[in-house]
Image (cartoon, rainbow, N blue to C red):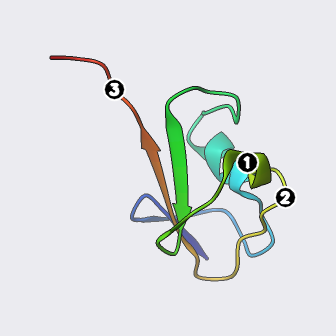
Amino acid sequence: MIRLNGEDCDLRAGATVAAALAQLDLSPEAKGVAVAVDGEVVPRAQWGLFALADHARVEVLTAMQGG
């Protein structure tokens, strides 16, 4: 089981960071998005290849505009 932004999700070990983004309806090409797995930032270039381990903690952050 993978934890995505603090909640269990349907992803299993071996799924990629790109698959985690899809769970959140985010495109890997979306601007202002950062991903950390188990507290380590994953470079955007690796999102399609980076395989998640069982019990991985994935945090997806999006930049927001405002004042």
- Quadrant housing the N terminus: bottom right
Q: Residue at x 22, y 17 (%)?
A: 66
Disc on the earlier residue, 3 or 1: 1
- Whole-Å distance between the Cαs marked 2 and 3? 27 Å
Mark 2: which amino acid?
Leu
The residue tagged 1 is 18
Residue in front for this viewpoint, 35 or 57: 35
Residue in front for this viewpoint, 62 or 19: 62
Disc on the earlier residue, 2 or 3: 2
Mark 1: which amino acid?
Ala
Count up the numbered dots: 3
Question: Judging from the image, what secondary structure is the residue with disc 3 in?
Answer: loop
Taking the image as shown, residue 16 lies to the left or right of residue 67, namely right
Q: Residue at x 67, y 82 (%)?
A: 54
Question: Judging from the image, what secondary structure is the residue with disc 1 in?
Answer: helix
Q: Position of residue 32 (x, y in %)?
A: 49, 30
Disc on the earlier residue, 2 or 1: 1
The residue tagged 2 is 49
Question: Judging from the image, what secondary structure is the residue with disc 2 in?
Answer: loop
Q: Position of residue 40 (x, y in %)?
A: 53, 69
Q: Position of residue 8 (x, y in %)?
A: 49, 67
Taking the image as shown, residue 67 lies to the left or right of residue 57, namely left
Which one is closest to the eye, mark 3 or mark 1? Answer: 3
- Whole-Å distance between the Cαs marked 3 and 1? 21 Å
Mark 3: which amino acid?
Met
Q: Position of residue 26 (x, y in %)?
A: 61, 33
The residue tagged 3 is 64
Residue in front for this viewpoint, 29 or 20: 29
| Labels 2 & 3 near each other (Cβ < 8 A) | no
